[in-house]
Image (cartoon, rainbow, N blue to C red):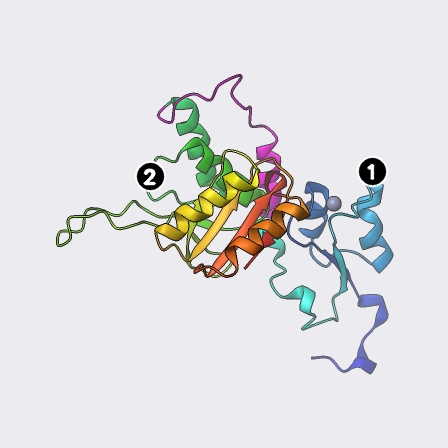
Amino acid sequence: MIDADKRDPKKARWARVPSGGACKVCVMLASKGFAYRSAEAAANAGTLAGSSHSRCHCQIVCSWAKGHPELAGYDPAALRKQWRFMEYRDTITEPAGVDPPKADPYWRARQAALRQFGFDGAGEVLEPGEIRFVERMLHRGERVKWLATPSLDPVTLMIPSGKDFRWLSRDGGEWQLKSPASAKYSSVRRKIGEALAKGQADVIVDLGGETLTDELAQAVARYAIPRNIRQLVLLSGDGSTLTTIK
Ligand SMILES: [Zn+2]
């Protein structure tokens, strides 16, 4: 650490530190690291790019702010990777009309493309919904690793209830993905009920492009909190919002 009185103010630099769900412009600006000569320059860079970014909740942090809470996990190299993924995601063309079947080359190619962004699919052929989920997570800068389907237990002759993925950027634990058909409470509750019946401890519910309303979040919390589930997280707004229920 440098003594405060020996710091040369001319050498101070500022960075833009994003929070989860920040837009592509903010992620790009944040990936530059401590590159701004004033707090104003760091703060205004996004406005110059043509948007107010009030929803992005970026923090402007000085290079001398060592140990600042905002800096925990601030990783410009990871943000560059996230930004590259965001650029790539904009080029994805969704199938016109009904989704092609899971085995279709369209999905194989779309899943294979995720490898260059560090996604490990464990040799599994993902369902279309799972591919879209992984894309939403990478878009947020999350790191996930898919888990191979467990094989038949030779003693019980049953297939153990498998988890879907390892959430590397959260707790490193094994999580179950649930994708309800709609953001209706009945549909979400049914999916959480399925996870409960299988004894799944850590569950993420992907609401796709739907927005999470306060009513739905409250209803889900009332249902899930007294029940035997360790962690419950809702992903909504096409991946822009991650809400921890429990
Ligand atoms: Zn932004």
The residue drawn where x is 69% and y is 56% is 33
Q: Is residue 98 magenta?
A: yes
Disc 1 on helix, strand or loop? Answer: loop
**Dot placed on the residue nearer the N-terminal end, 2 or 1:** 1
Disc 2 on helix, strand or loop? Answer: loop
The residue drawn where x is 55% and y is 23% is 93
Instruction: State the extent of the magenta-drawn residues as a range.
Output: 79-103
Amino acid on which disc 1 is placed? Gly
The residue drawn where x is 70% and y is 70% is 68
**Quadrant in which the C terminus appears:** bottom right
The label on residue 50 is: 1
Q: Position of residue 157 (x, y in %)?
A: 15, 48
Circle 1 Cα neighbour tier, 10 Å, few/some/many (<14 / 14–19 / ≥20): few
Inspect this view and state whether residue 169 appears.
no
Residue under label 2, please give it: 124
Q: Nearer the viewer, mark 2 or mark 1?
A: 2
Q: Position of residue 223 (x, y in %)?
A: 53, 53
**Quadrant in which the N terminus appears:** bottom right
Badge count: 2
Amino acid on which disc 2 is placed? Glu
Which of the 4 image quarters holds residue 36? bottom right
Inspect this view and state whether residue 175 appears.
yes
Front position in the image: 215 or 208? 215
